[in-house]
Image: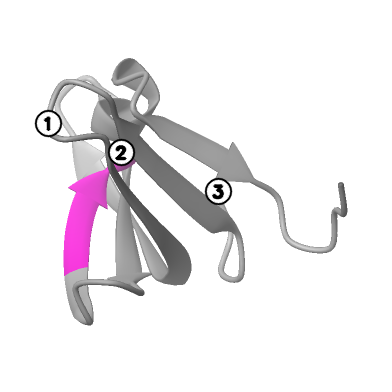
């Protein structure tokens, strides 16, 4: 489960080796016809922007790596 404070590393080698780091600043659980879905709000460092993504979209793309809060190295 993704939680507030987790770090998201974005690395896309297909687009000029773009990288960015974001932190989960908010999560919401929504009811859907097929069950529950988690909306994740990420604050990106380089772009200085906030982005909302569904957790299943985040999990489906290899460009995103989740680093759980409190873990080192």
Magenta: main secondary structure = strand
Instruction: State the CA–CA distance, disc 2 to disc 1.
Output: 29 Å
Where disc 3 sits, the SS reads loop
Graded by Cα atoms within 10 Å as few (under 14), some (14 to 19) or many (20 or more), the crowding at tag 3 reads some
| Placement of 72 over or under 1, stated as above or below | below
Residue 46 location (% of width, % of height): 28, 72
- Specify how the rendered protein is coloured: one colour
| Residue 52 painted magenta | yes
Q: Which residue is the site of mark 3?
A: 2
Residue 24's disc is: none
Disc on the earlier residue, 2 or 1: 1
Magenta segment boundaries in residue numbering: 51-55
Q: Can the viewer see residue 4 in this picture? A: yes
Where disc 2 sits, the SS reads strand
Residue 16 location (% of width, % of height): 15, 35
Q: Residue at x 39, y 25 (%)?
A: 59
In the visual, does 55 lie left or right of 67? Answer: left
Q: Nearer the viewer, mark 2 or mark 3?
A: 3
Q: Which residue is the site of mark 1?
A: 15
Res 21 quadrant in image = bottom left
């Amino acid at each position: 489960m993704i939680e507030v404070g987790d770090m998201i590393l974005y690395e896309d080698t297909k687009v000029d080796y773009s990288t960015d780091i974001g932190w989960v600043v908010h999560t919401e659980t929504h009811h859907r016809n097929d069950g529950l879905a988690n909306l994740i709000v990420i604050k990106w460092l380089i772009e200085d922007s906030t982005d909302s993504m569904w957790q299943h979209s985040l999990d489906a793309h290899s460009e995103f790596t989740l680093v759980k809060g409190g873990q080192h190295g």
